[in-house]
Amino acid sequence: MSESLLLIAASGLARETASVFRAVNGSGAGWPGGPLIGFLDDDSVKIGTTIDGLLVLGRLDSVVEHADARLVICAGKGIARRAIATRLAGLGVTDDRYLTVIDPSVRVPANCHIGAGSILLAGTVLTSDVTMGRHVVCMPKVTLTHDDVLEDFVTLAAGVSIGGGVRIGEAAYLGMNASVRELCRVGAHATLGMGSVLLTDQPAESIWAGVPARELTRRKDHS
């Protein structure tokens, strides 16, 4: 029996993920499963509505009614994706339920690793020995070069460019067209503003921006 696919969180990212799903099915490559059946979302206003031709079927807890479905968490923020993954784990969802979504334009070299539930949108480039954790999101035209490591729940907005040997900590967020110099470290839960150029390590919890990037503030709460 073919597996169906559910998108968790009826967001803009979910609509983009649905577009990739349809493109992959149309090309006859990649996803070998069954239909894309809809969204789950806790927003009561959305439940029962149709978004991009797909029905919002119910709250996240409704995942237990779709035990055979594969899942993709489509919340835009890494912290939100982590919270959802934790909640679904409490409902018995394991990593093997999550589908990794890769746009047909993206070539993944054999020496790269992409974790469960990650999403790579059009034009993403991986050169060599890139390691990507669980539920990572790469928006269009992200460039990752040799030996980069992205920990779980990282979000890279459109046009981000990462030099070689960079490590990006869990649930960090890099804004549109930001760049990171080779061998730098971006700490967990850090935010790098759009268009920024990071030339040195960025501490965890911090918000940096500018050219070159400098600290603006330090987060007090990332829960």
Image: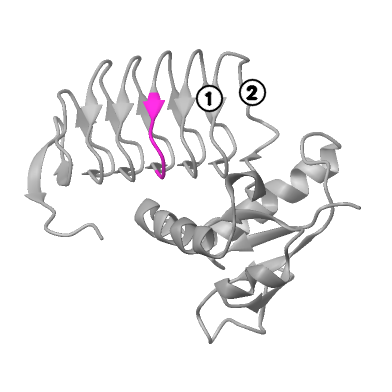
Q: Which residue: 54% across, 19% down?
A: 112
Decide which of 39, 90 is in the foreground and name it.
Answer: 90
Query: What residue is shown at x 67% (from left), y 31% (from top)?
Result: 105
Residue topped by disc 2: 107
- Checking the image for residue 125, the label placed there is 1
Q: Residues within 10 Å of mark 1 (few under 14, many from 20)?
A: many
Residue 41 position (above or below residue 149):
below
**Residues in magenta?**
149-153
Q: In this view, which residue lies farthest toward the right?
A: 1
Q: Nearer the viewer, residue 43 or 18?
A: 43
Q: Position of residue 58 (x, y in %)?
A: 63, 79
Q: Secondary structure at mark 1?
A: strand
Q: Quadrant of residue 123?
A: top right
* Residue contact between numbered discs 2 and 1, judged by CB atoms under 8 Å: yes
| Residue for point 88% across, 52% down | 2
Q: Nearer the viewer, residue 159 or 168?
A: 168
Q: Does 217 appear above or below 56?
A: above
| Quadrant in which the C terminus appears | bottom left
